[in-house]
Amino acid sequence: MYGKLYSSCLYGIDGVLIEVETDLSNGLPLTSIIGLPDSAVREAVERVRAAIKNCGYQYPLQRITINLAPADLRKEGSSFDLAIAIALLTTSGQLVLPPQERTLVLGELALDGSIRPVPGILSMVDLAKRQGFTSVLLPYENVEEARLIRGIGIYGLQHLKDLAPGHTLTSQGLNGNTSGGATSAGPIILKDYSHLHISGPSSARSNQGREILSYPHEDYSDVLGQHHVKRALMIAAAGMHNIMLVGPPGTGKTMLIKRLPTILPPLSEEEALEVTKVLSAAGHLKEAPQGLIADRPFRSPHHTISTSGLIGGGGIPKPGEVSLAHRGILFLDELPEFQRQVLEVLRQPLEDQMVTISRARAAFTFPAQFMLACSMNPCPCGYLSAQAEDQRCICSPARVAAYRAKISGPLLDRIDLQVEVPPPGDWRMAGTSPSSVEMQSKVMAAHAIQAKRYTNRSVRWNSQLSGTFLRKTIHLPREAEHLLDQTIQTLNLSMRAHDRIMKMAQTIADLDHEGEIMTAHVAEAIQYRQLDLSLF
């Protein structure tokens, strides 16, 4: 006897379709799982055996072969348990699924038959829709996450006992009509539907999702003074440029960067789906989401983080902080306190906007399109540039050099804006401070200009320009070009710094609603690179 069902597993953050084939033949009772299973998949035999027996079904006392195809792809995780159990029950004739349905089956089984949630449901349901499946059978706790994908029927199970022969229920039946008539979601064989949650194809998707990080009481109007720093942060937000703030303790570096999400525009629907899929694959959607993630991520890892924690990795590769910050901000507070080898791995994702983790049998690619924001003191004690008599620097030149050497030149070269944050002075004379709403409106206007300029292009922000497309897009007047060439020679900057200054100048022009780049825009962009010489 032969049977086949479909399941799925994660490959990076994307779902991969897996065929679960079962063959029952005469011989000594033995169950074998083939198709490159890992330990969690091999152990599924014992979970499935106990769950089937404890739910009143009969585990086939035959020679059982379970093949997970394609056979050359490593299978990992526990999402195959429910598919294996249902495949055994249907192949042995104990259960009949509706033939008109093309169903994807996902879920982990407990020994008593209850069904536990699995990570990455959003990616796997999205795969099912793209592959033409009409419905997905999955754990009840994953239903709300699965419903974020429109156009496919979602069936949530709490227990294996909910499945039984001879009982037909449709999505209409759940609403009180038990006639068993067919609906768009199709019938499925069930027993105790009082514990079942069924939703047909979702009619709409909310983009008012739960917030990853919310700042209901934090606003740039709370920060008095530091107007030039706010200007730099607004430029960074307008073009999604990397930024670093340098200054003594207590000048508000962390406070300023933590308010950066309040001036960024909300995620588009396409971006929201990407961000939610990354969090789902990482297992960070613990609570039932009410919609796609609406706010841009803001990740702030501790300086003791490992390379794998930052970039991603592990036996079963999971997204790291750079991927969890996808479409948002990665904030590294006290940058020199991070290990040098940890910081160096940022160079590749900052350029390629993705991370590839290679293993013996596969290579996993995770998205990593983020804005890097960081802060640091000018020296270990923090008071190298302080003017007060009671705040004199006590660091030797050798100690200061060792402190700064933790940040390599190539990494610093990829940080567009390097801004000094001095002590605020007399804050009573600072004047009115712009609010986050006012700053956000200017940022969104600049984003709109870029969206129009790059219509039907693979880039969205000025910071993504490179190569030939950069030269074709940005044109400097002769005076501004001469100023930039002189600066590159004087400060001994790299060609990467040259290109980043051009991209910043374009962003400044967009903020000022200028159709063309002026010499003043290039001059302002150059000011944000002077730390290349004065600090390092």
Image: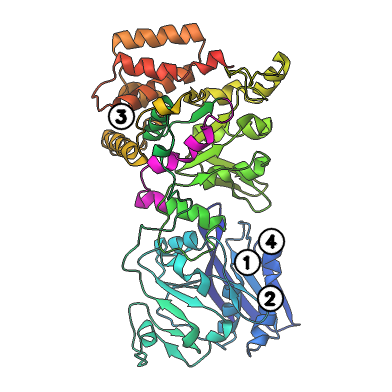
Q: Can you tell which mark lies on residue 78?
A: 1
User: Image quadrant of residue 331?
Assistant: top right
Q: Residues within 10 Å of mark 3 (few under 14, many from 20)?
A: many
User: In this view, which residue lies farthest toward the right?
Assistant: 28
Looking at the image, is mark 1 or mark 2 earlier in the sequence?
2
495 or 224: nearer the viewer: 224
Question: Identity of the amino acid at label 4?
Answer: Asp
The residue at which mark 4 appears reads as 38
Which residue is painted at 48% across and 23% down in the image? 425
Instruction: Give me the C-alpha separation between circle 3 and circle 2.
Output: 59 Å
29 relative to 511, above or below: below
Question: Identity of the amino acid at label 3?
Answer: Leu
Q: What span is in magenta?
A: 248-272
Which corner quadrant holds the C terminus?
A: top right
Instruction: Give me the C-alpha separation between circle 4 and circle 1.
Output: 10 Å
Instruction: Give me the C-alpha separation between circle 1 and circle 2.
Output: 10 Å
Apparent side of residue 60 relative to residue 17 in the rendered image (left or right): right
Magenta segment: does it hold 161? no
320 relative to 438, above or below: below
Looking at the image, is mark 4 or mark 3 earlier in the sequence?
4
The residue at which mark 3 appears reads as 511
How far across and down, in percent of the image, does residue 450 sit? Answer: 30, 34
User: Image quadrant of residue 220?
Assistant: top left
Which residue is painted at 35% across and 11% down in the image? 481
Q: Can you tell which mark lies on residue 47?
A: 2
Which is closer to the viewer, label 3 or label 2?
A: 3
Would residue 190 be seen by someone viewing this image from the given angle?
no
Question: Identity of the amino acid at label 1?
Answer: Ser
